[in-house]
Image (cartoon, rainbow, N blue to C red):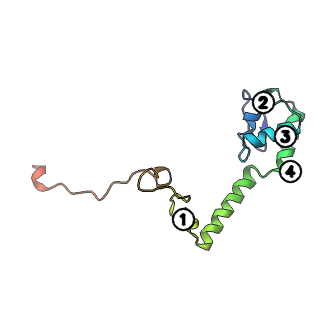
Amino acid sequence: MPRILGVDIPNNKRAWVALTYIHGVGQRTAFDILDKLKIDKTSRAKNLSEDQIARIADTLENEYVVEGSLRRLVAQHITRLKEIGCYRGMRHRRGLPARGQRTKTNARTRKGPKRSGIAVKKSIKTMR
């Protein structure tokens, strides 16, 4: 398995698909990198030479914001929104959707699983 910027990319995938396993690299960026370095897009990741892998890693590191630095940058942006107290920051703080989605239904991913209400005590008559 080739390793680029600390990420193991899968052997059996095509080169452009394997590059999308890196956080911050999508399909468009993968195609741009392979075109710039004149690497065949349809070749498999296991067939890439060490030189090609080194050139891809160098290009990603110098020209794009990917992996750890991208995650850090996004976290800083969210922290800034929380600190200034804007609407999006408040939504992040409360763990709710921040981009206008409805929350009456269909917000389970952000809100978490359904919670049960207050437990009702069984009456004495039903227990006998």
Looking at the rendered structure, the secondary structure element under dot 2 is helix
Q: Give the distance between the C-alpha atoms of the residues marked 4 and 3, in whole angstroms.
A: 10 Å
Query: Do the numbered discs 4 and 2 sit on residues whose CB atoms are within 8 Å?
Result: no
Residue 48: x and y in percent read 83, 30
Mark sitting earlier along the chain (2/1): 2
Task: Tell me what residue is drawn at x 29 percent, y 59 percent.
Answer: 118
Q: Classify residue 80 as left or right of residue 46.
A: left
The disc at residue 115 is none
Amino acid, disc 4 = Asn
Which residue is the site of mark 1? Answer: 93
Q: Is 29 above or below relative to 110?
A: above
User: Would you place residue 26 above or below residue 107 in this image?
Assistant: above
* Residue at x 68%, y 58% (from the top left corner): 74
Crowding around mark 1 (Cα neighbors within 10 Å: few <14, some 14 to 19, many 20+) is some
Q: Which residue in the protein does label 3 denote?
A: 56
Closer to us: 78 or 54: 78
Q: Label 3 sits on what residue type?
A: Ile
Which numbered disc, 4 or 2, marks the residue that appears first in the sequence?
A: 2
